[in-house]
Image: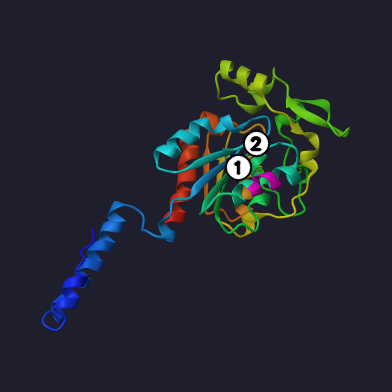
Amino acid sequence: MRISGKSRHRAHAVRWGAGALVLAGTASAVAAMGAYAGGPPGGAAGEKPTIVLVHGAFADASSWNGVVGPLQRKGYKVIAAANPLRGIPQDSTYVASLLKSIKGPVILAGHSYGGEVISQAAAGNSNVKALVYINALMPDVGESSNSLSAKFPASPLTKALNQVPFRNGDGTSGTDLYVQTDKLRQVFAHDLPVAQTDLLGATQRPIALSAFADKLTAAAWHDKPVYVLVGKQDRSIDPGLERYEAKRAKARKTVEINSSHVSLISHPQAVKDLILNAAEDYVWKR
């Protein structure tokens, strides 16, 4: 609500000067009250950020489907990025280029291996206002997921992987990792129906084995607000590791839920709530 009386004030400045000052003060107060009662403050400080979601290994952008819709209904623009899963140098560069194409503030969320990717991709990008880690890996500079994970007991996932050689068009070769389909539900998504985990097993996207040895050259979580979701029943990343990462990054908020590794599929409401919390904290400058 805003009361304008500029033309009146100019025409009767002398006669009504004192009254105009009172009216102007009242208008400012009413306008401020209206802004906070009806929504976030206007201008850059109140601009709703774009929410960018980065999936992890053995998945694709559709793993965020249960989160995207609710965020959109809250009025946010959402982009579920395609993570190449070829290794930190390539994947973080790819995501960083996507981020640079977005105008305005960004809230960046990563699941699992996607946590590594966003940590490096967001470095030096002032538009990224917060990082949200969902059952994620968060290595520091000079660390790889292998060296970080070695601080805690090996997860059951490590014994349920198949190695499959591949060859690139330029003649180079490498090795892809897949989750063994008969073990995927047990080690990856035990809180989902069998029919759904059978589908995940058949449609999984492999990750290059070399990705787990790639060391980060930048870690944006050192200088950006961090929000963490820990899956207490995670069998792919040790929950103790997820807690350790949150403490090391001085997370602004850490949420623990009874979830498998794929909380973004099995508990999309909790994941959405944490991402929304990060977005609203930015909008309201809390």
Real-space CA distance between mark 2 and mark 1, rounded to the nearest whole angstrom: 7 Å
Residue 226 seen: no
Question: In the rendered structure, which amino acid carries the disc numbered 1?
Answer: Gly
Tell me if residue 191 is in the magenta stretch.
no
Whether 132 is drawn above or below 46: the answer is: above
Q: Which residue is mark 1?
A: 110
Whether 10 is drawn above or below 221: the answer is: below
- Which SS class for mark 1? strand
Q: Mark 2 or 1 closer to N-term?
A: 2
Residue that protrudes farthest toward the left in the picture = 15
Nearer to me, 55 or 4: 4
Residue numbers of the magenta segment: 93-97
Q: On the picture, is 273 further left or further right than 216?
A: left
Q: Which residue is mark 2?
A: 56
Whether 163 is drawn above or below 53: the answer is: above
Q: Given contact means CB atoms under 8 Å apart, are the residues at marks 2 and 1 in contact?
A: yes
Residue 111 seen: yes
User: For the residue carrying disc 1, how many other residues have a C-alpha within 10 Å: few (<14), some (14-19), or many (20+)?
Assistant: many
Principal secondary structure, stretch drawn in magenta: helix
Residue at the spot 36% in from the left edge and 55% down from the top edge: 40
x, y (%) of residue 123? 65, 56
Question: In the rendered structure, which amino acid carries the disc numbered 2?
Answer: Gly
Residue at the spot 89% in from the left edge and 32% down from the top edge: 171
Residue that protrudes farthest toward the right in the picture = 171
Count how many numbered circles sit on residues in the image. Answer: 2
Nearer to me, 101 or 83: 101
User: For the residue carrying disc 2, how many other residues have a C-alpha within 10 Å: few (<14), some (14-19), or many (20+)?
Assistant: many
Nearer to me, 241 or 134: 134
Tell me the quarter of the image containing the N terminus: bottom left
